[in-house]
Image (spheres, coloured by chain):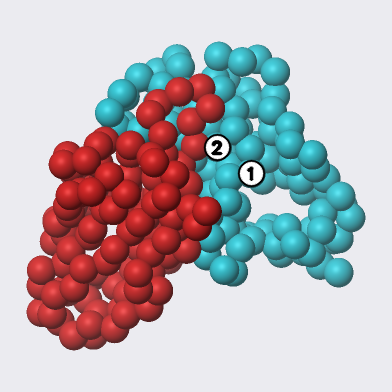
Chain colours: A cyan, B red
Amino acid sequence: AQTVTQSQPEMSVQEAETVTLSCTYDTSESDYYLFWYKQPPSRQMILVIRQEAYKQQNATENRFSVNFQKAAKSFSLKISDSQLGDAAMYFCAYRSAYNFGNEKLTFGTGTRLTIIP
Amino acid sequence: NAGVTQTPKFRVLKTGQSMTLLCAQDMNHEYMYWYRQDPGMGLRLIHYSVGEGTTAKGEVPDGYNVSRLKKQNFLLGLESAAPSQTSVYFCASSSRPGREYEQYFGPGTRLTVT
């Protein structure tokens, strides 16, 4: 079974600075997808960024980018120019590309990000 | 376009009571899911459905039942609530598997069992 580990329960960053959230995962599969979800105080789960394991290029979405190290099974999220609206719980998640009919996401325990004005 | 909606948003139950959580999606998605979120843990899958009339167990199915009688609705039932079922429940939906796959989440239901 796959596992996802987020070793930083809490992080804080000054507004406009850059912060990196860590995520590692364990799997024996070669094809899979990785996600970062944001959960603000409203509780709504919002997809931030998606990475496909077969793609070597790191995904980017505006101020959000990932550092995907497949051999190390590491998937960190970098937030540049942090804004107050980035304050939230961030979850890393894994999905197998093979489990047709069972598209479940395996989540890490989350990192609470605080933005310091 | 409302996306994924959940009813109710909050509920307090006494031990042994029953209730049903309703999830509705208007995106014509085939797949629907129920997760629970507990403090210090990520979301864990309770049950899921890959189409109308089908359901399957996830990681933590005990104490819950589900039904998918209509494609747009996915019901989660607690027959005899227990304090261990105090949690925040999320419903999600997605289209068929594909490279642009994404699960869309509802706003959550906070359930307290006393």
Q: Are marks 2 and 1 in contact (CB under 8 Å)?
A: yes
Quickly name the residue at label 1.
A48
Q: Is residue B82 above or below residue B38?
A: below
- N-terminal of the pair, mark 2 or mark 1, is 2
Do marks 2 and 1 both belong to one polypeptide chain? yes
Query: Tag 2: residue type?
Result: Phe
Query: Tag 1: residue type?
Result: Val
Quickly name the residue at label 2.
A35
Disc marking residue A13: none
Residue plotted at (41% across, 22% down): A97
Residue plotted at (18% across, 73% down): B19
| Quadrant showing the C terminus of chain B | bottom left
Chain of the residue displaying label 1: A
Q: Nearer the viewer, residue A113 or A63?
A: A63
Considering the numbered disc 2 on the image, is that residue within a helix, a strand or a loop?
A: strand
Observer able to see residue A21 = yes
| Residue B80 lies in quadrant | bottom left
Sort mark 2 into few (<14), some (14-19) or many (20+) by Cα contacts within 10 Å. Answer: many
Observer able to see residue A4 = no
Q: Nearer the viewer, residue B59 or A48?
A: A48
Residue A38, image x and y in percent? Answer: 60, 53
Residue A50, image x and y in percent? Answer: 59, 33
Residue plotted at (23% across, 82% down): B13
Horizontal side of B63 relative to A23 (left or right) equals: left
Residue plotted at (28% across, 28% down): A101
